[in-house]
Image (spheres, rainbow, N blue to C red):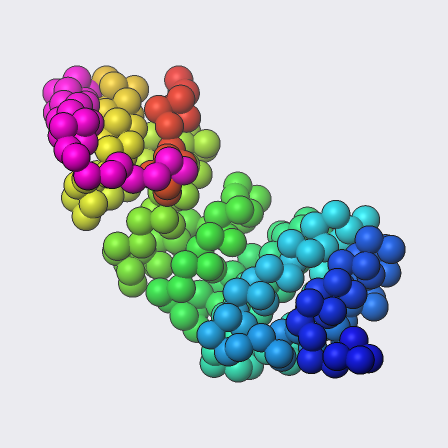
Amino acid sequence: RLALPESVEAMRYEVQLMVALKRPADTLEPLQALINLTPAPQRPGIITAVPLIFAQAVDRPATARLIEKILQPYVNSPSTGTAARLAIGNGWLLALDNAKAFEIARSTHSQEPTAEGPPTLALQLTPSTDADAIVESHLKAKPDSNAVRLLYVRSLLTRQRFADATTQLQTLTNTSPQMEQAWLTLGALHLQLREPMPAIAALQKYIDLVQAADMSTKPQAASGSAADSIEPTDVKPP
């Protein structure tokens, strides 16, 4: 770094060394330098990744404070503010301070209702905090936010709120009718709720989509998509 002060690779290597040597405080300067040298369009991405660097830290509250200190210069910038606040929130999530993480999710959502990060962070805190208000407000501002809606469905299923999960899946199948897994899970939920007719309709739609995909010569969607995050096995008896 002395010889090549603008070497991104040197900064990354120094950060990795400090983490491996359990000297997280010494990552502050090289991490900020790395963020500053990153082109503006890619800067939110590297800011988002900062908490992952410290995922194995032992003293997590101290690490959360360090993340906050590293990212403080970027909190008030229009281009990096949302990413910085959410990264700080994820730092407090790692520290198991749900109250601070939730407050960051709430305040960031109030500033940017269409951003997917705040409801995603809030959903990681359930059921210890009330994320539903943030999620539903976000979905009202951005109805086509399928990734957040899928996460919300999974959260509702985990809490055995099958009727609410069904409502969300019905909205999802209306806005994205080609999403096979959503139809399959919707059919399973209707069966769970002892509603055979809508269950048959949803499962038939799933079969039709699968058969159409099999007959198509176009490449199928890669596995591991957002729709794959919900499986019928998530639906457990009440």
Residue 92 visible to the viewer: no
Report the side of 65 relative to 129 (left or right): right
Percent x, y of residue 127: 53, 41
Report the side of 43 relative to 143 (left or right): right
Percent x, y of residue 81: 52, 75
Q: State the image quarter where residue 197 is shown.
A: top left
Instruction: Report the residue at 83% width, 68% height from top.
Output: 26
In the image, which residues are magenta? 195-224
**Nearer to me, 113 or 229:** 229
Percent x, y of residue 39: 53, 77
Q: Does residue 179 sit above or below 52 in this rendering? A: above
Instruction: Report the residue at 57% width, 44% height from top.
Output: 128
Quadrant of the snapshot with the N terminus: bottom right
Q: State the image quarter where residue 73 is shown.
A: bottom right
Q: Does residue 145 sit above or below 181 in this rendering? A: below
Residue 146 visible to the viewer: yes
Percent x, y of residue 89: 60, 60
Quadrant of the snapshot with the C terminus: top left
* Residue 95 within the magenta-colored segment of the rendering: no
Instruction: Report the residue at 35% width, 59% height from top.
Output: 138
Report the side of 187 relative to 68 (left or right): left
* Residue 208 within the magenta-colored segment of the rendering: yes
Q: Overall secondary structure of the magenta stretch?
A: helix
**Nearer to me, 24 or 218:** 218
Q: Does residue 76 sit above or below 88 in this rendering? A: below
